[in-house]
Image (cartoon, rainbow, N blue to C red):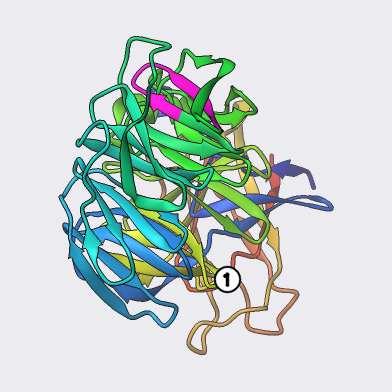
Amino acid sequence: MPFVEFVGQSRKDDDFAQANTSRLINVYREPGEDGFVLKSVPGTTLFADIDAVFLRAMQAVNGDVYAVCGGELHQITSGGSISTLGQVEDGDATISGNNGKVAVAAGGDYYVWDGSTLNTPTGGSFDAVGSVEFIGQVTVMTELNGRRFQWSDVADAETLGGLDFATAEGRDDNILRAVVINGNLWLMKEESCEIWYPTSAGFSRVNGGVLDTGLKAFGLVAKFDGGAFFVGDDGIAYITNGAGLQPVSIPPVETDISQGQARRCFYYEDEGHKFCVIQFNDRVAWVYDLSTGEWHNRGAGTELNPWRVVSAVKAWGYWHVGGDLGQILRLGRTNADFDGPLVRKITSRTLKTGEYQTLVRLELLGRMGVSAVSGREPQMYIRVSKDSGKTWSNEKWRSFGAVGDYDARLVWRALGTARQWTVEATISDAVELPLKAQAILEVA
């Protein structure tokens, strides 16, 4: 029987859905010895609940996690306890450390938590602060709706000198925020980026360090070890490559950036995979795997609604994500998300024969008989489309087999006659996905 690649990376494009129907929601591909296997994304377990709306920023500093949420700065410890440290202005926010202190930019204001008090330092060359970063033992602040950036005294986030500033004037646009990448300060602007480096006298711009691509929105950038991922003002997703940029988005990602409400980018890891996320308010997230160069989607709930995670941080040996409503969740192999199921949906490529044929048999391949759900056999179902996903058949359920039934098979027969077939497979049971990206198809 012919083995065929059942599904590739997510490539379904809302502008041209018939071109490639392949889609992975809450599933990603992992290379194996005999082809790709399909793996569930990490699930979430509630770790702490701030019980406030609009999580703006989250950062690990000096052994704890700090979060700006609901117009307040909060501290979360390794045991999950939450302390409210004080009020901050609501709006876009960033957090950085500085020798044990916590620097915060929120809603245009600048704050420093010194371990006992939340202060609002004065001085400096400007008062309206857009973002904060830490580099070269100083805290850098960018000017909100301006082109200047200033820095604190060495190892002292609270002392600001009026002459310790510079102006990013390589292009005629304002700074949105600063990001430290590989020891350089990237000033991400509305239509360009400038790269600066620390000196004994302050900062100097890297020779040739002006790029004609800006940041699409304040929240659409995420750092990872050795680089950053961001959505450019041109609607293309990039990763930094030294002092340059490498585009990584594919047409369906760019369609959703153009048509949707892209809100946040963030980064997390799962068992050797390094994921960069573009989170949307109005559709499922797009997730880029730096390890394989492939994209998949992430959604929430049984209806696969937008994933309401807006931030991620590694702390206490685990990756944690922050929900829009103030939940701090720990990532793990739970096969559940928030307080509901982790629904995984796999849509195949469209098999086109050019003439009417019968799909006699479809067999999905994988590890059978290894999981149980509340004493029963875990199940999945498929639906079949003969028109590239415009309409679908009824659900056709099958079992993975009882625990120990390693010879169980996922086989569907007599799936109809058509010129083309698209198959959608769905799993909602809290078990690990056991499938390969290949399938057996028999047509006649």
User: Is residue 209 rendered magenta in the image?
Assistant: no
Image coordinates of residue 133 in percent, x first then y, are 42, 43
Q: Quadrant of residue 352?
A: top right
Residue at 69% x, 73% y: name it.
408
Please rate how many residues cluster around mark 1, counting C-alpha atoms within 10 Å: few if below 14, some from 14 to 19, many from 20: few
Q: Is residue 197 above or below residue 287?
A: above
Q: Is residue 264 visible?
A: no
Residue type, mark 1 in image: Gly
- The magenta region covers 187-199
Q: Main secondary structure of the magenta part?
A: strand
Q: Is residue 310 left or right of residue 325?
A: right
Q: Which one is in front, 191 or 373? A: 191
Q: Which one is in front, 432 or 20? A: 432
User: Is residue 188 rendered magenta in the image?
Assistant: yes
Image coordinates of residue 372 in percent, x first then y, are 56, 82
Q: Quadrant of residue 173?
A: top left
Picture mark count: 1
Q: Is residue 345 above or below residue 260?
A: below
Q: Which one is in front, 22 or 10? A: 10
Image coordinates of residue 103 in percent, x first then y, are 34, 53
Q: Quadrant of the C terminus?
A: top right
Image coordinates of residue 176 in percent, x first then y, are 32, 29
| Element carrying mark 1 | loop
Q: Is residue 320 left or right of residue 444?
A: left
Residue at 69% x, 46% y: name it.
441
Q: Which one is in front, 389 or 130? A: 130
**Residue at the outermost right position:** 33
Residue at 46% x, 37% y: name it.
179
Which residue carries the number 1 mark?
A: 317
Q: Is residue 118 visible?
A: yes
Q: Is residue 276 left or right of residue 122?
A: right
